[in-house]
Structure formats: C-alpha cells, structure tokens
Amino acid sequence: MKFAVLFGGNSFEHEISIVSAITLKEKIKQHELDFIFIDQDRDLYLIEKKDMKSKYFSSGEYKKSQKVEFAKGGFRYFKGFIKKEYYVNYDAVINLIHGRDGEDGKLAGILEFFEIKAVTPNTEASAISYNKVLTKAYAKEMGVEVIDYEIIDSPSTKFDFPVIIKPARLGSSIGVSIARNSEELTYAFDVAKEFDDLIIAEPFIEGINEYNIAGFLTENGFVFSKIEKVTKKEYLDFEKKYMDFSRKETEFKEVDKSIEASIKAAFEKIYNTTFRNALIRCDFFEKDGTVYLNEINPIPGSLANYLFDDFDSVLIELAKNIKTEEKITIDYQYINKIQMAKGK
C-alpha cells in the first residue's frame, strides 16, 4: 500500500512531528510512503524520501521542494510553463502532526471537507483529546476513573505539595513541571503559562504505576498493542522523553492479568466509536488496583509503532477500516416546493 504522511504544522510540537515522520520512514519497510510537510506558515511541500533528514527542515532547504495544496480527494501541484496539474497518489493519508493543527481538529476538518481518506482522529475526537479538561470530563462520562485536578489562574493557589502543573492543551510533556513548594509553584505556573492560558494542577502521587497501550477499532473488534509499563524514577519531562537518544528499544515486562484486563476495558470505553479511524495511545495510571486515565494521545509519537510487533500489518488494517463520511444528496425539494407555491 501507499501512504501520504502529513507532518510538521504550526505547533509547539512541530519538531517532534518531524522526528516522528523520520522514524516512521525508517520503520516502515513493506509500504511506499510519500511525505507532505506543513511548515510554520502552513504551506505544504512534497518531500522526497532521500531528503527526510532533520537538517533539511531546520536549514530551510525544504522550500526547494515541490509545493502542493489540498484538493478534492487529495493533494495536487502544478508544473511547467502551462502549469500542468498533477495529483499525489496514495491509498490513505496518515496525520502525523502533533499538537496544534494536527490534534486540535483543524486538519481533521480539512481532510473531511476535501473527502480525503485518512488515519486521523476526527474533529470531535480531536476536541476531546486536545484539551485535558475535556478529556477528564469525557472519561468520567464513559465510566473511566481520572486523577483529580484543579484549574488554576494564579500561582497563589493553596496546595498540598507536591503537585504537577500542566498546560491543558499541549502534549509531549512540554510545559509540565513538578512543584514541591510555593516557590517552585510560581516557576511551574509561569512555564506552563508560556504555552497555554488554561493551566491545570494534579496531585503528584508517590508509588503510582504508569502503563501505555495503543490500539484501534476494526470491523472484527479492537486491535491492541503490547502494554508498556513505564519505568522511571520521576516524571518524564520533555528533555527526558525526547532527548535521551541512548534508549534504543522499549523493554516490556509482564503485566498482571487483572490490571491488563482493566486497562483494555478502559481503553475500549475511551475509544468507543468516537476515535474511529485513529490509532491512539492511552496512558494510564494504576494505584492499589484502580486504573486511572492519564491522557489520550490521538496521534502518538511515530504512531506508537514500537508497541506493535508487526506495524506494517497494522497500517494495512487501519487503511482497510477507515470509515468515510456519508455524502448527503441535495435535491432542493424544499426550495422547489416554495417556488411552486409561489407559482414561479
């Protein structure tokens, strides 16, 4: 199969998206990939596979690549003196834009409007998962436990320390800090405020276990990844998560069967049909046998390929199970009746 990978975007997670796309290029062996880069000005460029290197983007060389634009059913570009029209051919698009543009619903809306078949959360799912406050409300409604939180508008709020301070609409641990006292709370609040004007605080719970699982829904039921138990001494900030290049592989340890069952049951409730067409990763906490949703990653880094044994087959299943919006037939019966009633 052939996939067109959309990456970049005008987002604080722009560079993470580039890394995700490069990683996917290295991991996918059985499928052909085209890469469409959206830069900070939201211009689209068709990037050749040989140019999929980080420096190509940081240096601005990507602007030498062919510009493309959205069109009905896909992407097009024009070449030559007479501006002949060409189309990018593919079986499905993969939305790999993290954060704003890709996960907030903008791109999902554009893809739906242009009738572009894509592996992506839809606009509704994007709105729910992009905002941590909405995520928690949705999870509760679906019967999934969440960690208590408080929206804060100043660092003068009284807390039992330590607490975790987070921007409500950002992923990849950007802007996230642990505050152990009032002074650190002020600093953490200021850091989070640089990225968002909606800030939440959660208690930092000692001895809590963290698990990650990815999956998606097909006609035959759910497809789950392996469950990753996150082993760390403390909360992973952006630097620890994305700048530790010494970590080559993920170690998977056996998960208690009852916890595994609870995690998968919670995942199914979260995914429901709301996230249809998306491969998502859910991060869960577990304490004393109770499973809590931490966050929904509607477009996980590199599509969480490392959690699956055969990711090439996963892409086939995703593409086969994409549900497209049913087209409404407009016949103008109502307007015609009005005109007939007026005798026109």
Image (tube, rainbow, N blue to C red):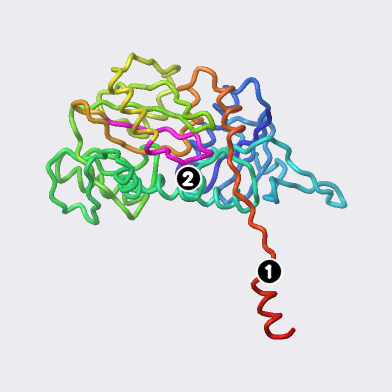
Q: Which residue is labeled 1 in the image?
A: 332
User: Magenta stretch?
Assistant: 269-285
* Viewer-closest of 90 and 194: 90
Report the Cα–Cα distance between label 1 and label 2.
36 Å
In the rendered structure, does residue 271 fall within the stretch colored magenta?
Answer: yes
Q: In this view, does 31 lie above or below 342?
A: above
Any part of residue 11 in sight: yes
* Viewer-closest of 103 and 249: 103
Which mark is on residue 103? 2
Residue at image location 21% in from the left, 48% down from the top? 186
Q: What element carries label 2?
A: loop
Question: What percent of the width, then of the height, locates residue 28?
Answer: 60, 23
In the figure, is residue 80 to the left or right of 257?
right
Q: In which quarter of the image is residue 30?
A: top right
Question: What percent of the width, then of the height, locates residue 193?
Answer: 32, 51
- Pick the quarter of the image with the C terminus: bottom right
Categorize mark 1 by other alpha carbons within 10 Å: few (<14), some (14-19), many (20+). Answer: few
Q: In this view, does 313 lie above or below 198?
A: above
- Pick the quarter of the image with the N terminus: top right
- Which residue is the extreme one toward the right? 82
Q: In which quarter of the image is residue 283?
A: top left
Any part of residue 58 in sight: no
For badge 1, the amino acid type reads Tyr
Question: What percent of the width, then of the height, locates residue 201?
Answer: 23, 45
Numbered disc in front, either 1 or 2: 1
In the figure, is residue 275 to the left or right of 285?
right
Q: Is mark 1 on a helix, strand or loop?
A: loop
In the figure, is residue 73 to the left or right of 214?
right
Closer to the N terminus: mark 1 or mark 2? 2
Residue at image location 28% in from the left, 21% down from the top? 258
